[in-house]
Amino acid sequence: MEITIEAPRNFSFRRTALSHGWYDLPPFGFDASRWALTRVVALDEDRAVTVEITGAKGGVAARVAARPGKRDVRKITRDVRHMLRLDDDMSEFYSAVRREPDFKWIARAGAGRLLRSPTVFEDLVKTICTTNCSWALTKKMIEGLVSGLGRPAGDGRRAFPTPELMAGAPEEFYRDVVRAGYRAPYLKELAARAASRQIDVEGWLASEMDSDSLKREMKKVKGAGDYAAENLLRLVGRYEGLALDSWVRAKFARARNGGEVATDREIENYYSRFGSWRGLALWCDMTRDWLEEEL
């Protein structure tokens, strides 16, 4: 069955699907030959289905092998809209970048929507698993989590595990199977707190806290420092933070500073013209060459 989902006029499926590395982590998958993003969507506590998402005229097409009922169609549609940020208002950001010659391409290309998971919990777990390690190790950890705890979709794929499923796993699972290292007790504790509602990470999406306060709240989660919190802020729609790491610093040196290493303050000053959108402007700037189309 194919579900047609309308998107804003300035939406780019390609720029959104490959906006950052989430497309490469299960339960996402990506087929570059067909420009198809796959995602295992949890329909309820016991059922999951694999959805293939492709660009379509006026929006995206979400395909499932089975014929889902109306309730399941609503859930799939809601998750796809959330993951692709189809309800995000980018007009203010696009107005800001259009004023800068080197950044006009962002609005023209429809860049700026950052792929995210259906839940903040999943984004938080994945973000913690990106810190202080290689991307290969991040992939290994997430693959271990999904294959070990995720509910099956019926085609060999699995959904991302719920907080309850993760909370029920012993710490040894995170250490010996997931290979999470020092993160093992952190992931166990986070899952237990989320499952028992001691922490409401989903509430961060609509939080009325200012971004600095929300960042401090995120940093209360063990394993989430400044870098992780600023990355997660982007995924809940807050773009003030730059989330500087070694890759961004090196890329900025090559792309914007003649190959010379810049201080973090110099990088901050460079993007300060974009105000509360500076973190998103930086990310689009640093990933401009990820796609080869004419800009």
Image: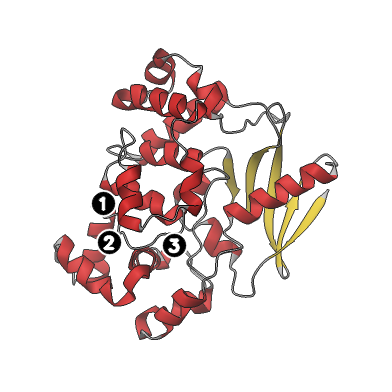
How far is the residue under mark 3 from the one under mark 1?
Answer: 18 Å
**Distance between mark 2 and mark 3 Cα atoms:** 12 Å
Above/below status of 128 relative to 277: above
Residue at 52% across, 50% down: 116
Looking at the rendered image, the disc whose residue lies closer to the viewer, 2 or 1, is 1
Residue 19, image x and y in percent? Answer: 48, 58
Cα distance between the residues tagged 2 and 1: 10 Å
Please name the residue that numbered disc 1 is placed on.
245
Q: x and y percent of residue 89 in the render?
A: 54, 69
Q: Is residue 8 left or right of residue 143?
A: right
Disc 1 residue type?
Asp
Residue 267, visible in the rendered structure: yes
Q: Earlier in the sequence, mark 2 or mark 1?
A: 1
In screen coordinates, is 5 left or right of 158? Answer: right
Q: Where does residue 181 sit, x and y in percent of width and height?
A: 31, 24
Q: Amino acid at mark 2?
A: Lys
Q: Residue at x 44, y 62 (%)?
A: 290
Q: Secondary structure at mark 1?
A: loop
User: Which badge, 3 or 1, comes first in the chain's sequence?
Assistant: 1
Q: Residues within 10 Å of mark 3 (few under 14, many from 20)?
A: few
Label 2 residue SS: helix
Q: Residue at x 39, y 78 (%)?
A: 103
Indicate which disc, 2 or 3, sits on the residue closer to the N terminus: 2
Between 288 and 225, the residue placed more toward the observer is: 225
- Residue drawn at (40%, 66%) of the image: 284
- Residue at image mark 3: 290
Q: Residues within 10 Å of mark 1 (few under 14, many from 20)?
A: few
Closest to the observer: 33 or 276?
276
Q: Which amino acid type is marked by label 3? A: Trp
Instruction: Give the labeled residue for mark 2.
Output: 251
Give the answer, above or below, for where 219 lies relative to 19. above
